[in-house]
Amino acid sequence: MKKFFILLIGSLAITVSSAIYAIQSHLKLVNLGLEIAEMTAENKLLRKSVTQSKAKEKKAVAKTKAKARVRRAISAIPVLGTAAFAAFEYNDYRQWVEENPSGTKEQYGCEVLNITSEVFSDVANELPENIRPSRETVFAVMPTCNQTS
């Protein structure tokens, strides 16, 4: 009978330790499942954020293009176009001064000239070929600037 109790207690000990191990393994699996669910939710949130950022960027680009289109249309009207051009340029200058409080008119002029020369080809290529000025012709009459922005 003593052997039976020892065998019974040994079997019980093995069963209990196996059960504890099984419970620990199950808890680890549950924890991993929760981590996966959390990572999936975070991934979804990040994807949504990226999509929203792309949409905002696309809208900002479209808005900038629309503003440029309106500026071109207004500038095409004689007299009003000249006044509008001056107003647009003055507003751009005021904004530049806010961003560069110690800047001079010459620095602004050089910055505008450098940026304009960078985008000239893109803008000129949008014009019909029969009215498109050559780069050399435009740059021959354009002032030069030795400052770097």
Image: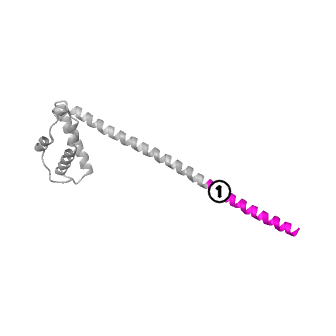
> Residue 136 appears at what percent x and percent y?
13, 43
Q: What residue sits 20% from the left and 44% below the top?
A: 116
Task: Write down the quadrant of residue 78 in the picture.
Answer: top left
Image: magenta residue range: 1-30
Q: Amino acid at mark 1?
A: Leu
Mark 1: few/some/many CA within 10 Å (<14, 14-19, 20+): few
| Left or right for 107, reference 1 | left
**Depth order, front residue of 96/52:** 52
Question: Looking at the image, which residue is at 26% across and 37% down?
Answer: 68
Q: Position of residue 69 (x, y in %)?
A: 26, 34
Farthest top residue in view: 77
Report the label total: 1
Eyeballing the image, is 47 above or below 83? below
Q: Secondary structure at mark 1?
A: helix
In the picture of the structure, the residue carrying the numbered disc 1 is 27
Q: Residue 59 appears at what percent x and percent y?
A: 36, 39
Q: Say if the magenta span includes residue 22.
A: yes
Q: From where the camera sits, is residue 87 visible?
A: no
Placement of the N terminus among the 4 image quadrants: bottom right
**Main secondary structure type of the part rendered in magenta:** helix
Q: Residue furthest right?
A: 1
* 136 inside magenta stretch: no
Q: Nearer the viewer, residue 147 or 77?
A: 147
Q: Is residue 70 at least partly visible in the picture?
A: yes
* Image position, residue 102 (x, y; %): 22, 54
Q: Quadrant of residue 90?
A: top left
Residue at the location (19% across, 45% down)?
A: 117
